[in-house]
Amino acid sequence: MELQIENLSKKYSSEKYGLRDFSIKLENGILGLLGPNGAGKSTLMKIMATISKPTEGTITLDGRNVITDPNCIRKVIGYLPQDFGVYPNLTGYEFLRYIASLKGIGGPNLRTKVMQLLEAVNLTDASRRQIGTYSGGMKQRIGIAQVLLNDPKVLIFDEPTVGLDPHERVQFRNLISELADECIIILSSHIVSDIETIADQVAIMKQGRLITKGFQPDIIDLVANKVFEIYIDKNNLPAFKEENLVVNTIRRKDNMLVRFISEQKIDQAVTCNASLEDAYLFLTKN
Amino acid sequence: MNKYRSIIKADYLQRTRSYIFIITLLASAFAAYSFVPDDNAPYSTVRIGNYVGYNNAAWIGHVTAIMTSVFLWVVGFYIVNNGIRRDGETGVGPIIASTSISNYAYLFAKSLSNFLILLTITGVTILIALGLVIYRGQEYTFNIVQFLMPFLLVTLPGLFCLSVLAVFFEVVFGNKTNLLNILFFVLFLFIVAITSASNNPNVIWFDVIGIKYLTDQLALFVSSNIPNGEHEISVGFIIDGSNKPSHFLFEGSHFSLFYILSRLLWIGTSLGLLAISAKLFNRFESKRKKPSKTKKSISAEALEESNNQKIKLAGLSKTSTDYSILPLVKTELKLLLSYGPKWFWLVNLAGFIALLVMPLNTAHQIGLPVLWFLQVNRWATLSTKEKHFGTGSFIFSTYKPIQRLLSAQLFAGILLALTFALPLLLRFALVGETSNLFEIVLGAITLIAFSIFSGIIFSGKRFFEIVFFIITFFIIQGGGFADYLGCLQSGHSYLFVQISMSLILIFLAFVARNLALSKY
């Protein structure tokens, strides 16, 4: 399967763009979307999920235009929005049956499949309870389960790990890994470590534009030999921040350990292995 | 004082910056215009026996104040009864609760904000009335005291009480909006019944709306000045037919100290009610139905185990495609049925039985409209729940959401409405009145299509609740123009009107949903 996005823009007013001239080509595998708030990640995902229309550009799925014929992708899409709700009076089981009906899923095995998915997200015990009684994490897991109802070929996860505890995040990562061979998966997150662990490729966005896209090592290479650590006095930190791109500070007893990115090495600074987070901060802050 | 001003201002701006408020103001202006009919109009609004007053400042002031009081008591409650609930829904509530503001101060500010909203609407009606004094005036002495006093002594205190009552109901009933709306409806009918049934002057102590004293004054004026004149008073939109009223020159009312005290007493009572509300107010403390399972701390072993745990997606059962809307209708029906408290089904059962035993015409004109009105929140959630519960992103990214989901919602709503009407349908079938059967079916389609259409267009339930309340009220009063059920009018031509109305509303519902989705 091939999903091609070409020159996609979403314009809210003459000055304000949600997305600007965005192009990317995706095949099976996991693409992690990184970007600060307002970068356009959710806007892009909403357009891909056909619940929002772009002002310019096209999206094609195996050559079929998704913008003019949204139903062609709706049959094979699984979408987990960033902010979603549920009907509190329905049980977890009933809610999944409802979403299955909306997705056009039926047949004698539907009940079994719904129960299997509830088990997969550890909600078997709560399946007969009204969703109004669920915790935030349980609701998020119901959201993940509904994504998989229709054996989707294109999965879109907008901030999927919000509300999940460490245990649940690990399970989610396992799930995604298993799906990646046969599906196109796009997921966004503010948590760089999530993307670092899950995604094959990474796309970094800023102010509605795609800044860079590539495999993780290639993106990390952009800041190779530019990441350093240095101990400095606490009082010197504000001045240091003005001259360097500080990515992290750790308080010590008498001073501070500062991780920063610089073109030139400073005296007493130690060169460090660059990470995706360093590259992300370098690209979005510069 | 600053804290009151800030809360009132924020609340007022939040409410008035909406389409629904602009529509309410336009509707109020139109209503105020219709309160003072010209000589050739086929109806009158306030009539004493066979008499109405010449259009002068005193008469127009009295008529407009009476009609505004009734009109705003009918719809005003539904306009303002969500101030506290909205704070809870938007998440502002818990922030307010964590500040030092007292319950009484917060609720008092909310009441004043409600009052300000109603005052704005009243202001529009006063301006229109003033215009009508000039435009339709038949007698040119402008008695400003007699023009304004009815508003000051009748309308405004009544609206202040209504503002506090809305807060009290919100505090007591919280999110049980179904119950809240219906109990107010019953309370309003009760107030109207006791004040219009009794001729005892002491009844004004029970007349929170305040119009009883004014209507008594009008009747007294007619009986004093026209010795043989009838002085039974009618208020509402009264179709005159061929019975055109005669005119008399109204000079104004005498507002006794006794009456002014009664109005002050109602304001005092409202403040007392506010104090009770402050005691009962939970400061947005939400109650969870059941505790969710306790999260345990994650040990390294557990994390390791999670890492090794694989969800067996390959083993998931294979399903087939099924694009029929029947499963959707079933779930929509279940969602409709699950709305509101369980005990309320006892009330519905009583209504169901009443439709079996009431005289047929009464069941058609009063029983069924009331029973359907009791489900107002059920109908109102049909097309608004996606927005209210935030499920829209799931739902509108599925296969053909408009054609399939909207059709399912229509079917489910109509099916439930007809189930409520079943006793009446059976009785009409038994007596062979098939046209009435059709009219009820068309009424159900019109009602459901209108609820869906208005829910989508106005992105909420409020407009539908207000309009449905007005329609139900007028049907019960015998107002033929609101007759969506064909209980007051019949014949092939009216059937054609009903069919056209249903089809237009269904078409509009689909167009509205399409438009709403394209702007998502």
Image (cartoon, coloured by chain):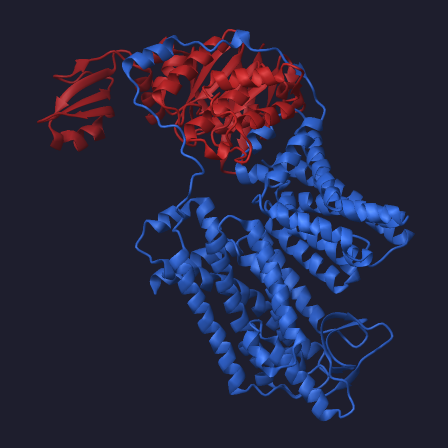
Chain letter for the part of the structure drawn in red:
A
**Relative depth, front residue between B229 and A209:** B229
Residue B321: x and y in percent read: 68, 17
- The tally of labels here is 0
Chain letter for the part of the structure drawn in blue:
B
Which quadrant of the figure contains the C terminus of chain A? Answer: top left
Which quadrant of the figure contains the N terminus of chain A? Answer: top right
Q: Is residue A108 above or below residue A57?
A: above
**Relative depth, front residue between A167 and B375:** B375
Q: Which residue is at a point 68% across and 88% down the rendered structure image? A: B221
Residue at the left extreme of this rendering: A254
Please say whether residue B108 is visible from this viewpoint: no
Find residue A32 and report its image quarter.
top left
Residue A105: x and y in percent read: 65, 19
Q: Horizontally, is B100 left or right of B344 in the view? A: left
Q: Which residue is at a point 81% across and 46% down the rendered structure image? A: B425
**Relative depth, front residue between A61 and B496:** B496
Q: Horizontally, is A157 left or right of B332 in the view? A: left
Residue A142: x and y in percent read: 50, 25
Q: Is residue B256 above or below residue A61?
A: below
Q: Horizontally, is A194 left or right of B156 in the view? A: left
Q: Horizontally, is B369 left or right of A145 in the view? A: right
Find residue B409 and report its image quarter.
top right
Please say whether residue A118 is visible from this viewpoint: yes
Q: Is residue B38 above or below residue A160?
A: below
Q: Which residue is at a point 22% across and 12% down the rendered structure image? A: A272
Residue A96: x and y in percent read: 57, 24
Find residue B505 and report its image quarter.
top right
Q: Is residue B86 above or below residue A32?
A: below
